[in-house]
Image (cartoon, rainbow, N blue to C red):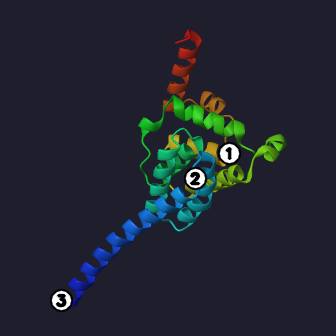
Amino acid sequence: MKPNCLFLLFMIIFSCCAGNLLSQGVEQRLAENGTTCSEKFAHAMNVLPKFYKEKSLDSLSKAIELWEGSCPDMPEAQITQILLDIEASAFSTQQVNSSLLELLDNYVTSFPAGKKKNKAAHDETQTSFYKFTIAWSSLLLRNKTLDNNQRFICKVLSGEIKYPQQEIQENPETYPELSTLLSKNYTVTRRGF
């Protein structure tokens, strides 16, 4: 074999092994640090920002997958997955549904910015989560070409939009999918179905 072919073969084998070791490292880190969702959340806030800063989207994806797998109803994991999907250009309009609107409304309701009462109530992990989502969503707004739905989500998560439903109602032409969804939700609520 020629030296270039050997080098290429070595690089392929190395990258496969490194990817496997990295995946095992993420799994081990999340598994060894707690068994409750609160403990996993605390550990995720120690690990995920580092992966993001390193632009290690594979590790970030694996960590979120493990976190969501062990704590599927945790809104913080769902929000982090949405940001990763937007970052990786994998966010689809199929993700725009009533549970997304509810998730964003709940996020804004518990968002500490400007709410002195709630700031004291948030623990360090929750504060880290908000700082992480604010920074990530702000960077996405600044550095990535986003569609209107993605831009809306990032503006809510960065704190720019404080009243998501009101924003949709006041700008239905900007957010046609979200406006239709909001109207359907309102109709279903009024009918009691």
Amino acid beneath label 3: Lys
Q: Which residue is mark 1?
A: 160
Mark 2 lies on residue = 141
Q: Residue at x 48, y 50 (%)?
A: 86
Q: Residues within 10 Å of mark 1 (few under 14, many from 20)?
A: few
Asked if the residue under mark 2 is in contact with the one under mark 1, i.e. CB atoms within 8 Å, the reply is: yes
Secondary-structure class at tag 2: helix
Neighbour class for label 3 at 10 Å: few (<14), some, many (≥20)? few
Which quadrant would the N terminus be assigned to in this image? bottom left
The quadrant holding residue 102 is top right
Earlier in the chain: of badge 2 and badge 3, it is 3
Q: Is 130 displayed left or right of 153 in the figure?
A: right
Instruction: Give the x, y percent position of residue 91.
Output: 44, 45
Q: Position of residue 106 (x, y in %)?
A: 65, 35
Residue located beneath label 3 in the image: 2
Task: Judge whether 176 appears above or below 190 on screen.
Answer: below
Give whichever of discs 1 and 3 has the lower sequence position: 3
Q: Amino acid at mark 1?
A: Glu
Residue under the point 37% across and 66% down: 20
Q: Residue furthest bottom?
A: 3
Q: Is residue 106 in sight in this rendering?
A: yes
Real-space Cα distance between discs 1 and 2?
11 Å
Q: Is residue 145 visible?
A: no
**Could you tell me which secondary element the residue under label 3 belongs to?**
loop
Dot 1 falls on a residue whose secondary structure is loop
Which quadrant would residue 108 be assigned to in this image? top right
